[in-house]
Image (tube, rainbow, N blue to C red):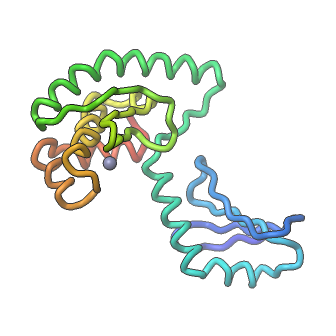
């Protein structure tokens, strides 16, 4: 096994009985890239492989995605289910009023709002159906953070991309959004 620093994170290369090189990042350890290589490959060859722009881009994209994704609480299945139920209840209480308020301010109308046990994002918005989905794990955060996600998803009905116009609308209506995004990234409620 060999470990070295690479583009701001750690790469751990292990020789294994594998046919192809595998790269993996575990959500609970986003700073480490685990690489399995076949016994026939040298560590130096693996290192060179990692310098391919394609691989560098993959790692950057992946780590960015992990940084923005809901953190998985370290709980038993039962505890998790209990917590999810609690968060869901809290969100069900908060969301209708927040959606009403922001639909009016932004002059938009969304479709169905669902609360999902999603790991990949805090919220999502289907431009076609205008349906919005909110991660149940958002329920762990302050009302400000919940409100930010509501505003963020509703702004997508005005501007689909995360571009200057999108952030301009957020700045105008919810100037606190950066601090909320930070809290969500850090995973602290
Ligand atoms: Zn978005």
Q: Along the horizontal axis of the image, is 1 left or right of 11? A: right
Q: Along the horizontal axis of the image, is 72 left or right of 140? A: right
Q: Along the horizontal axis of the image, is 98 left or right of 105? A: right
Residue 174, horizontal then vertical, whole percent: 16, 42
Q: Total marks drawn?
A: 0
Query: Farthest residue in the front direction?
Result: 128
Depth check: 12 or 88 in front? 88
Q: Splitting the image into 4 quarters, where does residue 107 fall? A: top left
Which residue is pictured at 35% across the width and 21% down the height? 91
Depth check: 54 or 140 in front? 54
Q: Is residue 185 above or below residue 46?
A: above
- Rendered-image quadrant of the N terminus: bottom right
Q: Splitting the image into 4 quarters, where does residue 44 fall? A: bottom right
Residue 140, horizontal then vertical, whole percent: 41, 28
Q: Is residue 102 above or below residue 22?
A: above
- Rendered-image quadrant of the C terminus: top left
Which residue is pictured at 20% across the width and 53% down the height? 166
Which residue is pictured at 24% across the width and 60% down the height? 163
Residue 33, horizontal then vertical, whole percent: 64, 63
Q: Along the horizontal axis of the image, is 189 left or right of 23? A: left
Which residue is pictured at 59% across the width and 73% down the height? 55
Residue 96, horizontal then vertical, whole percent: 26, 20
């Amino acid at each position: 096994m060999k470990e070295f620093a690479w583009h701001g994170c750690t790469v751990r290369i292990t020789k294994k009985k594998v046919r192809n090189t595998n790269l993996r990042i575990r959500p609970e350890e986003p700073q480490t890239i685990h690489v399995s290589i076949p016994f026939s490959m040298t560590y130096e060859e693996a290192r060179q492989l990692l310098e391919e722009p394609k691989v560098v881009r993959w790692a950057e994209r992946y780590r960015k995605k992990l940084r923005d994704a809901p953190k998985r609480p370290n709980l038993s299945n039962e505890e998790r289910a209990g917590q999810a139920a609690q968060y869901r209840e809290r969100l069900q209480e908060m969301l209708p009023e927040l959606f009403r308020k922001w639909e009016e301010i932004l002059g938009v109308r969304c479709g169905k709002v669902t609360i999902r046990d999603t790991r990949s994002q805090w919220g999502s918005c289907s431009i076609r159906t205008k349906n919005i989905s909110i991660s149940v794990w958002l329920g762990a955060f302050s009302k400000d953070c919940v409100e930010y996600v509501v505003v963020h998803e509703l702004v997508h009905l005005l501007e689909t991309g995360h571009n200057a116009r999108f952030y301009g609308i957020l700045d105008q209506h919810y100037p606190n959004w950066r601090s909320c995004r930070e809290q969500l990234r850090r995973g602290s409620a």
